[in-house]
Image (cartoon, coloured by chain):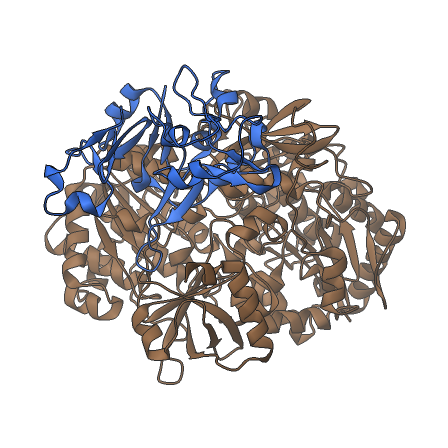
Amino acid sequence: MARLPVSEAQLIAQYGPHLHYEPPGGWQASSTAERLVKTHCCFCGVQCGIQLKVRNEQVIGFEPWEEFPVNQGKLCPKGVKRYLQNNHPDRLLSPLIRTDAGFRQASWDEAVTRVVDSIRRIQSTSGKDAFAVLSGASLTNEKAYLMGKFARVALGTANIDYNGRLCMVAAGMVNKMAFGIDRAANPWSDIPLADCIFVTGSNIGECFPILTDYVWRARDNGARLIVVDPRMTPVARTADLFLPVRPGRDSALMNGILHVLIARDWIDHDFIAAHTVGFAAVQAAVTDCTPQHTAEITGVPAASIIRAAELWAEAQNSMLLHARGIEHHSKGVENVLSCINLVLATGRIGRPGCGYGTITGQGNGQGGREHGQRCNQLPGGRDIENPHHRQEIAALWNLDEAELPHTGLSAVEIIDAINAGTIKGLLSISFNPLVSLPDAARTRAALEKLEFYVAIDVFLSETARHADVVLAGSLQEEDEGTVTTGEGRVVRIRQAVRPPAKARTDWQIVIDVAQRLGKGEFFPYAEPEELFRELCRASAGAPVDYAGLTYQRLEQNHGIFWPCPSPQHPGTLRLFTGGSFAHADGKARFHPISYRPPAEDVDAEYPVILTSGRVVSQYLSGTQTRRIGPLVDQYPGPQVEIHPQLAAKLAVKTGDLVRVESRRDALTLPALVVRTIRPDTIFIPYHWPGEQSANRLTIRALDPLAKIPEFKVCAVRLSKVTDCGLDGQRKSQAEADWGWEKQG
Amino acid sequence: MEFFIDPSRCIGCQGCVHACAECDSHRGISMIHLDFVDRSSSPQTTPTVCMHCIDPTCARVCPADAIKQTADGIVQSALQPRCIGCSNCVLACPFGVPRYIPKIDQMMKCDMCYDRTAVGLKPMCATVCPSGALYYGPREAIEKNRRAHPINTFTFGRQVVKTKVNFMAGSTVEELEIDVANFMEGAGEQERREDT
């Protein structure tokens, strides 16, 4: 029973989100730091270096860290204002236990005892797998490793998955399929060296702002820029070639470009013969993908498809970069494979300034997917169904191999299993599925059905409001550890301050639960560095090899790129040099892709495509960034981006409220009429809950292999809202937020 | 070291605006701003910092003689004992930079982070700017590394303004015409008022 204990309004009044604007003591207080802590921003996979200013054991601001080579002091607004998540009035300061009147503060002993008793009760009556864990990709490597081990060893459940399932999982799976290893092939420093930059499904300027400078430097050096996106993003604005693809048609577009390259014999026969397997099948698969045929499917002109092939072919060195735009699909794996087919067919990988990569979105999007918190994975990127891999990890963990659970359910499937009644208990950490999973009504129904739910978090997220017990954990800057950035660089996260009041570090909480479950002998860690040493040992000889890394080496070298198999090894800046891939035969794999439509295409009833994404001032489900005042002011709430042609049919202008309805649910939001989106598509950013939640509309369709949801395309219908009442109030609020009346 | 603005690189993230408010000399108040040029048709944005005119219009129109330039050409916020809060400077600045702050009844403006540059640091906005749209560094570096080239002469109608801060423009552009009047018949025959 995990319905909200009291009304949402009461919970918000007490636990927020409230907006926080000023450092401790206000702007008048001294800004002189007692110490500067060199660490990294917590808000995306770039992991910009930043120095946190600490005074009186509080984070009071930041100072750019210009020596860190990736960003050289640069920061986006999230990095600049991140320090306002510290000393926040909404911060959870002690364990909470739900009551009929909301939540009450509890001692750690009482709270953890309640958790352990509930785990035991559920598992003894319904089996080990009836208790699930939902973990996060914003956690450090140490915590990601700990959560995987905690689930398999302390809980003995197969059902642990993480919110990277909503993020990088399609690209990660494809990396293993095509290359035998899951990491971006090139460091970002290769971007400025390329002659052609091909960006598909990545709003770099808003989601990875610091990488914009890398793209601009490539352009300064004369590189051509191709951008594929249904919206004209800040980077697409400057592209030599802009391909405004109809959402859900990405693999068709890549097939079409590859068709032209093959037809004109602009492929690298020597590379294909020496370093790859399976080209013939791909060639056959794209035979019919003529520019005209591709244009009909994708909505991109045939001439532009040919021009893309020309620009790609003219280059000596190229970088193909993508992100969630092509991955958030029921065919995310196929979309990514279609990109890799293009890269391999032209031999454009494994050289300075020449390669390929997905840009990971979450703070530890790369490391979070390596160390065993995925439902089908063991540490070191090992496969949980590989007998040899199971033996290795069982031996390291002092277990019998048979005790190690097998593949569990993925994130969305866990929600489905809760709804079906087979999963009855849940522990979540750093995950806000009520906002971030598709079809939010279904997620809410699952939360209300749980027999017991414990959340470890720093703020009472929309999901944590449903918890029976909330354990006050730690922010990134309140703990030691490491993360692995989107380019495969393992960097050090430093503890700037201790968790406030009775809050504790996440790993201490998890170990406490493990100990009380009688599994303490498996979790003998006194500090994060001991966890790191064990995860490095666990990765030795595995696909993801950290064996040669130490905290000291990471600190001395501004991070080190894995694989790093020994203490003397300098790390691996670039993968696949000389065309050597990580499959046993050293060759990369082609995979033939035949385009298929999205799970829910438009029709007469729901004629418009909805695509979702991010804005620069918010991070993921907004648990942190919707509490930081200046970031909220910058983009106060979701707007529906609508092209003037579509807006004219609806008689809608900027600021009008529109009702957007899908087969799941409906939302009423203000319109932003812009020529920067396809006329057949609308865009809504997804960072908000409740009445503003884009994920109430999105579809729960999953990629059959990666189980990533199709956030980027579903069918909706729109209508203008003309009546007053509640919507009239919301319109007034939206007008005040956005200042339309001032704009005239 | 010089300051260069290149709006063609701007991604509209507002990192500069937020970072400005973290500067010690005006904590909590940003002295710079960022605008969409026309959001309905483009995501193009442009950041505005003080251009530090060689002969600053804001100082010329100040009835209280409150706006001073340092020897190295930085135009400072209005001097507190002199500023009468009249907002002449706010209205007169051709770039829209000075701000009247009602709470202190005084004009404040971007001083290119005098506190930071004085100790060898870059201005806060140019340090954090993710896209290099705001850049502080040696002229040789920007001329070598970028295709656009720096100019510092602007014509507003008949007023010609030269600035310490540079604006990146196309390779054939030597000065920027801001006023439609500059493009109208007879514009070349009018007397240009050189302010420098």
Q: Where does the N terminus of chain A fall, quadrant-wise?
A: bottom right
* Quadrant hosting residue A102: bottom right
A257 or A232, nearer to the observer: A232
Query: Which percent across, then down, holds residue B109?
Result: 48, 33
Which residue sits at x=42%, y=52%? Answer: A171
A379 or A728, nearer to the observer: A728
Q: Measured along the vertical axis of the image, is residue A419 above or below residue B72? A: below
Q: Measured along the vertical axis of the image, is residue A651 above or below residue A534? A: below
Query: Which percent across, then down, holds residue B69?
Result: 42, 21
Q: Measured along the vertical axis of the image, is residue A590 above or below residue A397? A: below
Q: In this view, does A113 lie to the left or right of A345?
A: right
Q: Is residue B187 left or right of residue A210?
A: left
* Quadrant hosting residue B48: top left
Q: Where does the C terminus of chain A fall, quadrant-wise?
A: bottom left
Residue sitting at the far bottom: A605
Which residue sits at x=18%, y=31%? Answer: B174
Query: Which percent across, then down, holds residue A637?
Result: 53, 60
Query: Which percent across, then down, holds residue B149?
Result: 23, 30
What's the colour of chain B in the image?
Answer: blue
* Quadrant hosting residue A14: bottom right
Q: Is residue A410 visible?
A: no
Which residue sits at x=65%, y=58%? Answer: A158
Residue sitting at the far front: B63
Q: Is residue B171 left or right of residue A160?
A: left
Q: In this view, does A329 lie to the left or right of A235?
A: right
What's the colour of chain A in the image?
Answer: brown
Q: Can residue A668 be seen in this view?
A: yes
Q: Measured along the vertical axis of the image, is residue A621 above or below residue A139? A: below
